[in-house]
Amino acid sequence: MTRQEEVRLIRLAAAGDRDAAGVFIKAHQPALFAYLLRMSGRPDVAEDIVQEAFVRVLSNLDRFDSRFRFSTWLFTIARRLYLNACMKHKPTYDTDIVGALHTDRELPEYSVIGGEVQENAKDALQAALLQLSPEQREVLVLFHQLDWPISIIAQHLKMPEGTVKSHLHRGRRRMRELLERTEQGRQTVSEVWIS
Amino acid sequence: MSDADTNNPFLPEDRADGPIPDELVDRFFDRELDDSARAGFMRRLDDDTRACERVAKTNRILTMLRRGVGAPDLSDSILDRVDRVRGFVPPSQRKLVRFGRLAVAAMLFGVIAGAVIVQRRAPEVMELAGMPTPVRDVARAAADEADGLVRFALPTRLVRHEANTSLDSERSMWGPRHLDAESQSVVSWSWSPAAACALDREATGVDHALVLVGGRVVLIGNTDDLRPQQASLAPVTFRARVSLPSVRSGGLRELP
């Protein structure tokens, strides 16, 4: 969708055109869903947040500043909803000691995903993604899956471009290590079965 | 070093037979290499098996990542929810809405333009009335203050009467005074004769009542004739104290 087309559709949708709003949803829905699915690892969470984000955006189209990209606005709202959902489901510890014992699980999405993470991770890629830090995962998805430029990602995540790159490099390396390990594990299992 | 140089993996330090540095691999995946640099990088991979394997594995991962995920079509449920929140308008009604908005805007513009024209041609029409506020209205506005006004009006008139009588001859002797009068609501007060005289001159009429109301001095020409021009409100310009001592007899006497 070109920029002009986007602005035209926004005007129409803001004026109450259902068809224009539908075109918008269809254009941005797959990318937003993929982003949220990769972030959360849960299709139901992704679906809920996609719906909520679109409802908010389409209900407040008159507030949209056309100097910015619509997708950035949509993803910013979706990201905030996702983080809110993570915070809402975050378990509270009775004491800091108990909390400290769970430091390896203090990432907010663990709470959302809970014990179902591994069950719902349909492939090794998703499982590896979920083992990255949230920043690494988000940067990786935005850059490699959604093809966002580094500068836009930096703006979206409110961090310097250098930091974005750093997360990107570490994320890629970690993904490679994790998937190599998974592959080795599979080989070991098959060797045991064969012997 | 220019940008072209930084993009060139064939610089002397990179041309060495050693392994491809991780930084270069990162820049390759960050899409920071131009076409010639990319071509050079690929050629160098042929000589570096370890880097080649690393790049191939990473590339496979990223290809998997780029593969789209099956997104369900949520557009209908989203549109229904949006419809409930703000309501979509059919195309025919959209014209009406647009016309309505234009009409409201035109009306607002007309009202503002009309106001400007009237302001220029007949400014007096637009002016707010500058009527003085009668003391009676002020007194009515606050029940407590009105009570005080009535209670103090008579005795203070007496005070003023006697004060005026003696003012001509004993102006320099004026100081704190105390009044014992027959009225049950007689006041004991002290005042500055200079300030009183100043107020006296500003007011018209002879028979004045000087009443303290809510921290302000109210000058009333005649309690039976509260015409606005004879009454004025002035801030307290002198210290005055009002109290209600027991009443015995009339007359003015020096305060101790």
Image: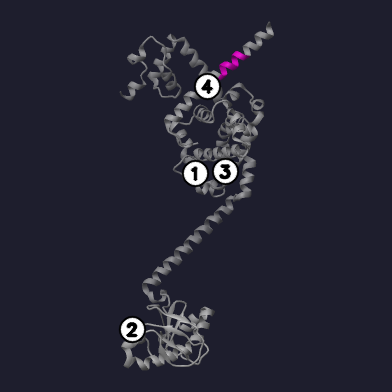
Q: Residues within 10 Å of mark 1 (few under 14, many from 20)?
A: few
Q: Main secondary structure of the magenta part?
A: helix
Mark 1 lies on residue = A8
* Residue A37 falls left or right of residue B171: right
Label 3 to label 2, Cα distance in Å? 81 Å
Label 4 to label 3, Cα distance in Å? 40 Å
Q: Nearer the observer, disc 1 or disc 2?
A: 2
Tell which circle, 4 or 3, labels the residue nearer the N-terminal end.
3
Q: Amino acid at mark 1?
A: Arg
Label 1 to label 3, Cα distance in Å? 11 Å
Chain of the residue where label 1 is placed in the rendered structure: A
Magenta residues, start to end: A178-185
Q: Secondary structure at mark 2?
A: helix
Q: Secondary structure at mark 3?
A: helix
Label 1 to label 4, Cα distance in Å? 43 Å
Which label sits on residue A21?
Answer: 3
Mark 2 lies on residue = B194
Mark 1 vs mark 3: tell me if same chain.
Answer: yes
Residue at the location (65% across, 12% down)?
A: A189
Q: Amino acid at mark 4?
A: Arg
Mark 4 lies on residue = A174
Q: Determine contact: label 4, label 2, CB under 8 Å.
A: no
Q: Nearer the viewer, residue B180 or B2?
A: B180
Q: Nearer the observer, disc 3 or disc 2?
A: 2
Q: Determine contact: label 3, label 2, CB under 8 Å.
A: no
Q: Nearer the viewer, residue B170 or A2?
A: B170
Q: Nearer the observer, disc 4 or disc 3?
A: 4
Q: Secondary structure at mark 4?
A: helix
